[in-house]
Image (cartoon, rainbow, N blue to C red):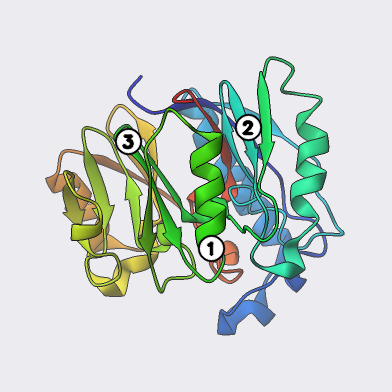
Amino acid sequence: MDRFFDEVFVRPPGSSYERCVSTNPAKGDIDVALANKQHGDYVRILRESGIKVIELLPLDDFPDSVFMQDPALLGSRVDVICRFGEERRRGEESALHEELSHHRDKISRVRSIQPPGTLEGGDILVTDHGFFVGESSRTNADGIRQLAKCLDDISVTAVKTGLFHLLCGCAYLNNNRVIIVPELVSPESLPGFEFVSIPRHEAYAADALYLGEGRVLIPSGFPKTAAKLKSADYEPIEVEISEFRKGDGGVTCLCSPVYRLF
């Protein structure tokens, strides 16, 4: 399999999800019941792709906790527990760390980002040519420096971004290819890659998840992105995640993969 992981952690949205941190004007229209249905569809697609899905319990004390990508970067040998730049989400990482202790008995190392560092998983672009980390409003230079120390055998490159998270504008596919919105993420900041460029008005679909064997999970309703992927010999798999878009989340935000790379 040409994807980097075969196992992910997910967490359904809790009853408090409607109180999540979001800049989306539609946040007030979040339908928690519909969000749970959409989450179930998302999980079904992952399982149909041969991915082992470990479902954790909802955390009603943390409205944003459905966005599992952010609190940790998980690997086959090392887990890095992040530290939120968004102060209202702090505490999620500690809760996840405790839960992981019941599922991750084979891990040899667990590292945590310490103050004043901040690091959120949505800023980490994982590739087989090193990791590129967005220095953003949520992830700072010290957090990136600490991550590099945690992953001493992997190249970690900082990419300054004005985006909420770096992965709001790009995602790694396979075979040295990145899906990207060039107006939001400069291709020059990711040297050596080939790009599947999509238009800015469909930027939400740049947050895509490569499922393996040419299949790419994208949010439904982005025809130009789907066409671009098809022309690059990928098969777009669409999932409706309208309620998570209202919470400023995308396709990759909803799971925490366990990467084989580190």
Say what amino acid the circle numbered 2 marks. Asp
Q: Of the two numbered discs 1 and 3 on the same chain, state the one appearing first in sequence.
A: 1
Q: Residue furthest right?
A: 61
| Residue drawn at (29%, 35%) of the image | 129
Numbered badge on residue 79: 2
Indicate whether 183 appears above or below 8. Answer: below
Q: Of the two numbered discs 2 and 3 on the same chain, state the one appearing first in sequence.
A: 2
Q: Assign a secondary structure to mark 3.
A: strand
Which of 100/198 is in front? 100
Say what amino acid the circle numbered 1 marks. Asn
Q: Which residue is mark 1?
A: 140
Q: Which residue is mark 3?
A: 215
User: Real-space Cα distance between discs 2 and 1?
Assistant: 19 Å
Say what amino acid the circle numbered 3 marks. Arg
Q: Residue 236 placed where, x, y %? A: 30, 45
| Residue drawn at (67%, 68%) of the image | 86
Is residue 145 toward the left or the right of residue 130 in the image?
A: right
